[in-house]
């Protein structure tokens, strides 16, 4: 039996990268998936791939910073698939980068709204639906940046991702009695479109530098990160809640 049989999941930031890989993996493991992102074409292609492989999925396009989108994702899960068991609040951005004196106030707010406030909005509507099902699993995408390491020029990003861990811990205590587990994954460098190595104008020296930061001397693939999300979504992690789950290839402890 697949490990997410009869489960319903929401995955945000699903049009590429970790969210895309996780949505496909959830579907392969039996979940019915509601996928979200801002790019309709990419989401439609993802849904088509899932359905071609025998899975079930539906797309809700929209910006996770919009409370109406958070509400509509849960409504879709309930109306189309009967409820909600898992939510992977994954959408995020590196945001405006630069020294603290150079970051604009609008850039600061945009980063926090995308990485942190969107997760709050998602949770606000996801929790009641999970309670209706008798419990569930909430998962956030945080980062080692702002937790086990600092990076210059990433104050807004680090602040937003560190705050997600604080929210994770508080929600785990608040919701444990309701049967809802709450965890955050902290990926290391991952080969996604948002990675600095894939930024316009980045040369091979950028990827080499990023590789060397890790004990494993390489970046992760999105599929590798998605397997850690599956673990937290499934009953294999039934006694895990409130964790900052490092999936970072040793970047947090590497000094070589």
Image: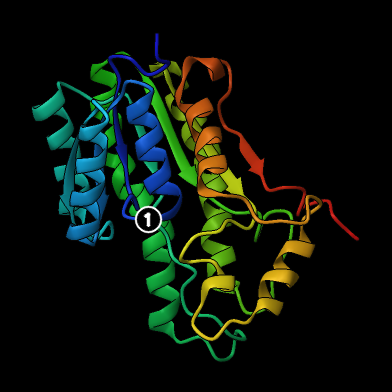
**Relative horizontal placement of residue 12, taking residue 162 as reference (left or right):** left
Residue closest to the far top: 1
Taking the spot 71% from the left edge, 56% from the top edge, the residue there is 218
Q: Residue at x 53, y 26 (%)?
A: 231
- Which quarter of the rendered picture does the C terminus lie within? bottom right
The answer to which of 171 and 205 lies nearer the viewer is 205
Q: Is residue 22 visible?
A: yes
- The residue that mark 1 highlights is 16
Asked which quadrant contains residue 179, the reply is top left
Q: Is residue 63 rendered to the left or right of residue 239?
A: left
Q: Residue 60 location, x and y as percent?
A: 16, 48
In this rendering, the answer to whether 184 lies above or below 150 is: above
Could you tell me which residue is drawn at 60 percent across and 47 percent down? 186
Q: Would residue 223 appear left or right of 121 to someone viewing this image?
A: right
Q: Position of residue 79 (x, y in %)?
A: 8, 28
Q: Position of residue 156 (x, y in %)?
A: 53, 71
Q: Is residue 125 visible?
A: no
SS state under label 1: loop
């Amino acid at each position: 039996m697949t490990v997410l049989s009869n489960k319903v999941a929401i995955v945000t930031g699903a049009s590429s990268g970790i969210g895309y890989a996780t949505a496909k993996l959830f579907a392969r493991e039996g979940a019915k998936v509601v996928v979200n992102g801002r790019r309709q074409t990419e989401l439609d292609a993802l849904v088509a791939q899932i359905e071609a492989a025998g899975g079930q999925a539906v797309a809700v396009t929209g910006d996770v910073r919009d409370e109406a989108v958070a509400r509509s994702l849960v409504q879709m899960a309930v109306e189309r698939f009967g409820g909600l068991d898992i939510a992977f609040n994954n959408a995020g951005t590196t945001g405006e980068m630069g020294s603290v004196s150079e970051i604009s106030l609008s850039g600061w707010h945009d980063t926090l709204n995308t990485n942190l406030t969107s997760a709050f909005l998602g949770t606000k509507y996801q929790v009641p639906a999970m309670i209706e099902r008798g419990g569930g699993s909430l998962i956030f995408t945080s980062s080692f940046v702002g937790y086990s390491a600092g990076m210059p020029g990433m104050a807004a990003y680090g602040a937003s991702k560190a705050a997600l861990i604080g929210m994770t811990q508080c929600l785990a205590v608040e919701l444990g009695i309701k049967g809802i587990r709450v965890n955050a994954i902290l990926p290391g460098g991952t080969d996604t479109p948002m990675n600095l190595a894939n930024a316009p104008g980045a040369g091979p020296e950028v990827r080499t530098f990023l590789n060397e930061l890790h004990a494993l001397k390489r970046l992760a693939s999105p599929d590798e990160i998605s397997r850690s999300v599956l673990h937290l979504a499934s009953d294999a992690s039934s006694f895990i809640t409130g964790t900052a789950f490092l999936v970072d290839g040793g970047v947090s402890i590497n000094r070589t």
